[in-house]
Each structure stands twice: as structure tokens, then as C-alpha cells.
Image: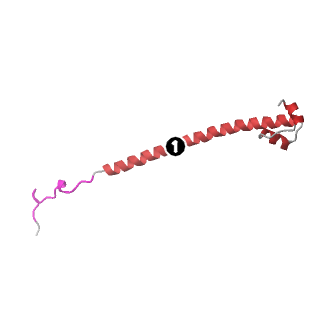
Amino acid sequence: MSLPMTEENAPNQDSKPRRSCSGKQRAMLAYGVTQITATVVSAISLTVIAVGFCSVKQESKAFSGCVEEVMAAGRSNAESVRYCNGGRLPKRERANLGN
């Protein structure tokens, strides 16, 4: 036996608990902020690496120039590299290099 629909026995929309989307919105916001932060950190890291390569390139040019200069003074390649790495040359060669 079925009861006729009346306001009293009709399903009330307010009687069901409403689920708000605020929890999902917060989670998506947190996810978005995390993604943006990770992108910014990655960009900064790549910039630091690029700047580091520039200084390595300059140091390499200076080292190569040093080796060429010492080799022009009559030393071997190995002796030139040793000198440019902070080693010493015999006294006879120091006079030729201006040290």
C-alpha cells in the first residue's frame, strides 16, 4: 500500500546531509601550490647550475692560457700542467716566467 505524496511524507532535500566541496578545494589548492613551488625551485636550481658552468668555463680558459705560457717558455706539457696546478718549477725556469 502506497501513501500519496504530500508535503509531510515527501523526501526533504534538507534532511540529507550536504557534502561540501571545501575539502576537495583545499586539497586541489595545496596540490597546485606544491606544483608551482616545485617548478620555481627547479628553475632556480637550473639557473644556479648555469651560472656555475660559466665560472668553470672562465677558469678553464685561464688554466689553458697558463699552460700555453709555460710551454712557450720551453717546459713540457706535464711540467706546465704541474706548474699551473700550483707546483714549482726549477729555479732556471722561474727566471724565464718572471716569478
**Quadrant position of the N terminus in the picture:** bottom left
Q: Is residue 30 toward the left or the right of residue 99 in the image? A: left
Residue 34 position in % (x across, y down)? 44, 47
Q: Residue at x 59, y 40 (%)?
A: 48
Circle 1 crowding by C-alpha within 10 Å: few under 14, some 14–19, many from 20:
few
Query: Residue farthest to the top?
Result: 98
Which residue is label 1 attached to? 41
Q: Is residue 71 toward the left or the right of residue 24 in the image? A: right
Q: Is residue 86 above or below residue 25?
A: above
Task: Provide the residue span drawn in magenta.
Answer: 3-19
**Quadrant position of the C terminus in the picture:** top right
Q: How is the image coloured?
A: secondary structure
Label total for image:
1
Q: Residue at x 47, y 44 (%)?
A: 37
Mostly what secondary structure, the magenta segment?
Answer: loop
Residue 53 position in % (x across, y down)? 66, 40
Residue 93 position in % (x across, y down)? 88, 35
Which residue is at the front of the view, 8 or 75? 75
**Can you tell which quarter of the image residue 89 is in?**
top right
Q: Residue 4 lies in magenta, yes or no?
A: yes
**Can you tell which quarter of the image residue 63 is in?**
top right
- Secondary structure, mark 1, is helix
Query: Residue farthest to the front?
Result: 91
Q: Is residue 27 toward the left or the right of residue 68 in the image? A: left
Q: Residue 85 lies in magenta, yes or no?
A: no
Q: Residue at x 74, y 36 (%)?
A: 61
Amino acid, disc 1: Val
Residue 73 position in % (x across, y down)? 88, 34
Which residue is at the front of the view, 45 or 74? 74
